[in-house]
Image (tube, rainbow, N blue to C red):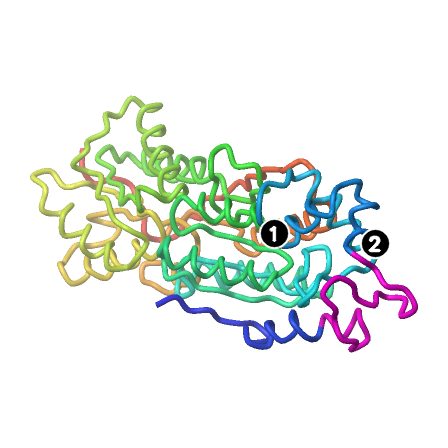
Amino acid sequence: MTTCVIIHIYLHVIYRVLHTGFLSKWCGGASVGMESIPCKDENLVVRISDVAKLAGVSTATVSRTINDSGYVSQDTRIRVLEAMDELGYTPPGGRRTFLQTSLFIALVIPDVTNPFFPAVVRGVDDSIKHQGYQLVLCNADDGAEQELALVQMLVEKRVDGLIYTPARDGKAVLDLARRYGIPIVLLDRVIEDSSVDCIATDHHAGAYKAVQHLLDLGHRRIAHIAGPKDVPSASERHLGYLAALQDNQVADDSALVIQGDYTQHTGGWALEQLMALETPPTAVLASNDLNAVGLMARATECGVRIPRDLSVCGFDDIEHSTIVSPKLTTVSQDKYGLGKLAAEYLLRRIREPLAAPRHIRLTPELVVRESTTVSSRV
């Protein structure tokens, strides 16, 4: 079931703010008529025809923009929204536009229990609260349908913007946000050909560094626990793994690639599959640290010594990586920096809705600890 964790306030309060508090702020508590309302100047009544005149469009176009019904080009939509904002026009019934701020930003993530995300959340929250915004943190339960339903609710309530880490390919959510005119920034996922801002780690480079480290230690049978096929970060890490093998003239073996997800359970199951091979690997790159932790726990139960029998490298550098024994060698992502940059880019997008989209890649670093060593196999 889709859940939503709210930082600072509950969603039902958001509903009340958007549907009552906003009107009180701009209309002084006055009743709203069918075509006109008192604006910021209580002696002036703004009509839909005034908005149309200032925007240089028909009243029908203004109505379509307000109701999200029928086609309105993005440039025209922006002109209408700017005219509404300049005149202080609020549509009948209190329906609002993203230029008329609610001061709420939503962060939608696939799995709130994944230890990767707390630092990301902190980075987002630290950035937006200094600008007067409050954060709505939403968990999509790692499902595309749940995710879409959740974002549908958020955009209908007209949050000021979305920071979004897709559970899968995310294109349906991007289309939905675009249709509602909600500013959106992709976080740690890259969707090809998307015309939105994106802040992500260079997952390909991170995986390449990890495999190169294992190769430098003399390993040649290097396994990979691959993440979900339809998650861009997992695909990029797998391609980085393959590229490092190829550049070092090491043949890749499909038997050494275990397809899974980003959970500890997958790590334990993968260890069993890999050690059952006729020629087991001497090293493994896990798709993330949770995989690696699960693998190491199962290795202890099975009598596989790490790193003597099997070197293990993770990805993410979550807190678990320094708690397990031996401490985990891993690829470190700047999780706080990802969240902070995503928030900064979203705030820019809210201020400048027509600015050209930017894609930023942060370079990860390999952190060598105790779970990798030289290969004992000649």
Image point 29% across, 41% down: which residue? 374
Vertical side of 136 occupied by 296: above or below: above
Vertical side of 51 occupied by 239: above or below: above
**351 is within the stretch colored magenta:** no
- Give the number of the mark in front: 1 or 2: 2
Q: Nearer the viewer, residue 150 or 40?
A: 40
Q: Look at label 2 and name its amino acid.
A: Glu
Q: Where's residue 164, x and y in %?
A: 51, 53
Image point 49% across, 49% down: which residue? 333
Give the structural element (helix, strand or loop) at label 1.
loop
Q: Where's residue 231, x and y in %?
A: 37, 44
Image point 72% across, 55% down: which residue? 99
* Residue labelled with disc 1: 182
Q: Where's residue 321, x and y in %?
A: 39, 59
Q: Are marks 1 and 2 in contact (CB under 8 Å)?
A: no
* Residue labelled with disc 2: 86
Q: Quadrant of the N terminus?
A: bottom left
Q: Nearer the viewer, residue 31 or 256?
A: 31
Quadrant of the rendered image containing residue 34: bottom right
Image point 26% across, 50% down: which residue? 307
Quadrant of the rendered image containing residue 279: top left
- Magenta span: 22-47
Label 1: few (<14), some (14–19) or many (≥20) C-alpha neighbours in 10 Å: many
Q: Look at label 1 and name its amino acid.
A: Ile
Q: Nearer the viewer, residue 59 or 249?
A: 59
Label 2: few (<14), some (14–19) or many (≥20) C-alpha neighbours in 10 Å: few
Q: Where's residue 72, x and y in %?
A: 63, 41
Mark 1 or 2, nearer chain start: 2
The disc label shown at residue 247, or none: none
- In-image side of 97 versus 253 (left or right): right
Q: CA distance from mark 1 to mark 2?
A: 19 Å
Q: Nearer the viewer, residue 350 or 318?
A: 350
